Image (cartoon, rainbow, N blue to C red):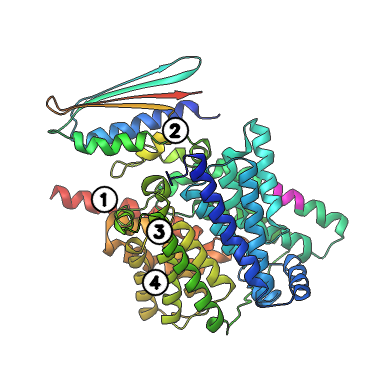
Amino acid sequence: MDDSGTTPAGNRLHYGILVSTFLSLVLAGFLFDTPSGIVKGLLKIVTDPDYLITDYMGIGGVGAAFVNSGLVSLLCVALLGFLKVQVTGITFAAIWTVAGFSFFGKNLLNVWFIIAGVRVYALYRKEPFSRFIYSALFGTALAPLVTQILFGFNVSPALRIPLAALAGISVGFILPPLGVAMMRFHQGFNLYNIGFVSGLVGSIVLSIFRSYGFIPQSRLVWTKGHDLQLAPLFFAFFLAHFALGYFLGGRKVSGLAAVMRYPGRVVTDFILLEGLGPTLMNMGLGGMASILYLLAVRGDINGPTLAGIFTVVGFSAFGKHLRNMAPIVAGVVLGGATKIWGMNDPPIQLAALFGTTLAPVAGEFGIFWGIVAGFLHSSLVLNVGALHGGFNLYNNGFSGGIVAAVLVPVIEAIRTGREKS
Amino acid sequence: MIHEHERVVRMVAELQNFLFSMGASEIRSEIRETPEAFLVSIKGNTRGNICRKVEKLRKLLSLARRADMEEELWSLAGSVDFDTELSLVGMMSDRAEVRCDGDAGVVEVELVRRK
């Protein structure tokens, strides 16, 4: 069977894998909490002002965080199915990113306003919504903006509710054209393009908020102590992905070797290029390596780091692999050895995982430049969050876009000069 | 669909980049617009027999049209000269034909992009 998703049978298989993956996440939630505890936790999650960094495990509990992530993802998969979208690597990247960030920032309430905004844009352009579906899914990075207005502003509900809806829909409306325009800025070397766009939009929105006297307090809800339960659970989860990929790929690892030869710059859709089997193996490896890294630096397995791990796993279907991610992580580790922060400081744990947005720099220009990119990113990402006040969940995508846009032309100039000499 | 002409220009630029990377010193491009489609034809000489490498080009250009991916990513086509986005060109085309004459060192690509 063709497993690139270009045949109806291949596409059904891809949908089946996505549904079973995120259904299992919902069911796993009930291992950690009672049904009533989960419902109470979900209510707390959807009403919390959840800008960076807000670990839903600390707001609604581990069980509710799992169920929130699973349900939001399943609803997004249902939307893809309704729109008859062909599932390939970019789809896996989008859904896994949504799933990950539904552990810290996206929830059953706030994502729909952004998605509705993109739908309005499609109506305005008189084009099918399916054309803009990835802007809609990735664009939910700005969902905390909606929650903040709904539950964080001290004004009457008659004003807050329409204002929140208007803000979410307006942001969704402008994301698709901005996404196309900003892609040129970093030339596809930052995999989280919408993260860069959302950083710019979030910075403008926060500036307006500040002009009216609203200054959000910095926030850090970060849970600890779940490692013994969550590390083995997710390691097994990713091992299962690897095993499934191995069997679907004809019990061969040659496809995985082929995946690792790509530089990974956008557009590198591994499912289209190498098929589902090698892609699932690559995703599994990315997930297992991320967990081992966190354990090695004495980090934490919690909502925010699971978002990082899930994003690595998702983008391992669309550009990332161990060869191009390792130099970036090495750059962050080098920063940890020489800068004023520690490797297990919360923002640095996230920088190592999400910093792999710059993996194509290493894939295209080699290990040295990958390390430089990771090193620069680990500093920049600590500073750009202040611009958007944490409203952009993909803070690392914002930083990664700037690093790529500055670094790539310099590398090119140096490389071209060396070739001439 | 907005920026329709720019999209076609970028597809052509991407293919021109590819031919340059194969050692071409002479490239001829032709774009014809009809009410239904854009017809693109590009021909270039190459350094030596590259027909084996052209197999990869053929595979990438034969990818099915993907309006969803195009809408998100089209601006990357033809954006850099050190890497290729040929799969994107494939996803922006409805039909692609690649011909390679190894002895003469010539590669010819024809694309159809329906409106």
Q: Residue at x 86, y 59 (%)?
A: A157
Position of residue A289 relative to residue A19, above or below, is below
Q: Nearer the viewer, residue A139 or A6?
A: A6
**Residue holding disc 1:** A413
Type of the residue with mark 4: Val
Q: Earlier in the sequence, mark 1 or mark 4?
A: 4
Disc 4 sits on a residue from what chain? A
* Image location of residue A131, percent across then percent down: 57, 38
Magenta segment's dominant SS is helix
As measured in the structure, the alpha-carbon distance from the residue carrying label 1 to the one carrying label 2 is 30 Å
Q: Nearer the viewer, residue A185 or A61?
A: A61
Type of the residue with mark 3: Phe
**Residue holding disc 4:** A332
**Residue holding disc 2:** B92
Badge 2 and badge 3 in a common chain: no
Give the residues drawn in magenta, as a range: A165-171
As measured in the structure, the alpha-carbon distance from the residue carrying label 2 to the one carrying label 3 is 32 Å
Q: Which mark is residue A110?
A: none
For residue A306, what is the image quadrant?
bottom right
Disc 1 sits on a residue from what chain? A
Type of the residue with mark 1: Ala
Question: On the rendered structure, is B64 left or right of A81?
Answer: left
> In this rendering, which labeled residue sits more in front, label 1 or label 4?
4
As measured in the structure, the alpha-carbon distance from the residue carrying label 3 to the one carrying label 4 is 35 Å
Disc 2 sits on a residue from what chain? B
Q: Earlier in the sequence, mark 1 or mark 3?
A: 3
Q: Secondary structure at mark 1?
A: helix
Q: Which mark is residue A247?
A: 3
Badge 2 and badge 4 in a common chain: no
Number of dots carrying numbers: 4
